Image: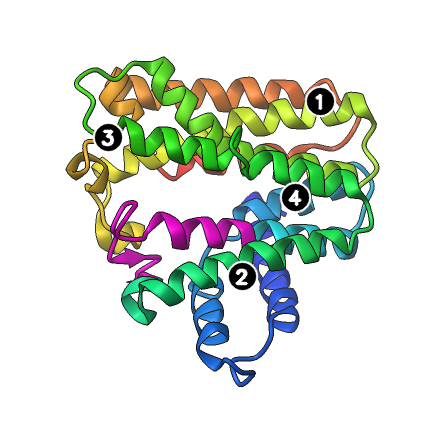
Amino acid sequence: MTALEYLARQKDRVNGFLDNYLLPDTVKPEIIHKAIRYSVFSGGKRFRATLCIAACETFGGSVDEALPVAGGIELIHTYSLIHDDLPCMDDDDLRRGKPTLHKAYGENIAVLAGDALNALAFDLVSRADDCRLIRILADAIGTEGMIGGQVADVMSCGLDEITEDTVRFIHTRKTAALISASIAMGALTGGATEEEMNVARRFGAGIGLAFQIVDDILDIVSSDEVLGKDVGSDEDMDKATYPKAIGLDASKVKARELVAEACGYLDTLEHDTAILKGLAEFVIERVY
């Protein structure tokens, strides 16, 4: 099975799981459940959830064991996108080819839907009955993770000089932290040892940073139709990006180097890591 086939299969499984878990939009107050479902089922690739499932299977676990954890991760990711799109943040009109949630349901409902998804995510992860998973996720999205990266991103807009160190600080927290946590949580669910967990984290950190570098590149070279969101918004907001710091061509090279280094970590494991490596290659294939 190719990585793309695996990604498509797990996407269907995660969507089915979340569809059964989330309350139907007939439950009062109907608008919040409609808004949640609008965002959750707006067509995402389920990349982070798939990484979690793949890591779980790599270390001997099953898809069924991974699904609550993977589903929780996906709800966190969706919440972060809802809040990232808000007028007080990036003020985007499109997400995955559809109007952003605040455009479709209003800013107040969008904020509340994001808050609800954050709570639901921890409910799901807690069902795996291992408090270490909750700690990994909390660390990944807190002030030293995703939220911290978002703060640094906001504060860096419009700076005259952007260095690679500045952008790396933002990207490793805003994007890579959750991707790394997705793999670590999957590995833990699958029974990985502490040493194997450390390898999983390093692999995740590398492909997570590469993922955001590729997103920076796509914001320049892609289109609204292909990318499904407002292209050129980084430049419009004068955001700190890798192409701004080191140039477009150097950014492409950097992303490739990060993926190659990350895959090298997997070579130290006595497990079949072909799917994880294939998913890592998918990160950079999006821009070539």
Q: Name the spot of residue 40 as percent of width and height, x first.
A: 49, 63
Earlier in the chain: of badge 3 and badge 2, it is 2
Residue in view at x 60 percent, y 70 percent: 22
Q: Mark 3 and 2 residues: CB-CB less than 8 Å, in contact?
A: no
Q: In the image, 121: left or right of 229? A: right
Q: Which residue is mark 4?
A: 52
Span colored in magenta: 75-100
Q: Which residue is mark 3?
A: 157
Q: Name the spot of residue 180 as percent of width and height, x first.
A: 59, 32
Q: Which residue is mark 1?
A: 198
Disc 1 to disc 4, C-alpha distance: 15 Å
Crowd around label 4: few <14 · some 14–19 · many ≥20 (10 Å): many
Disc 2 to disc 4, C-alpha distance: 22 Å
Q: Name the spot of residue 204 as percent of width and height, x first.
A: 59, 30
Q: Name the spot of residue 115 as percent of width and height, x first.
A: 50, 57
Earlier in the chain: of badge 3 and badge 4, it is 4
Residue in view at x 64 percent, y 26 percent: 201
Mark 2: which amino acid?
Answer: Ala
Q: Which residue is mark 2?
A: 116
In this view, the mark in front (1 or 3): 3
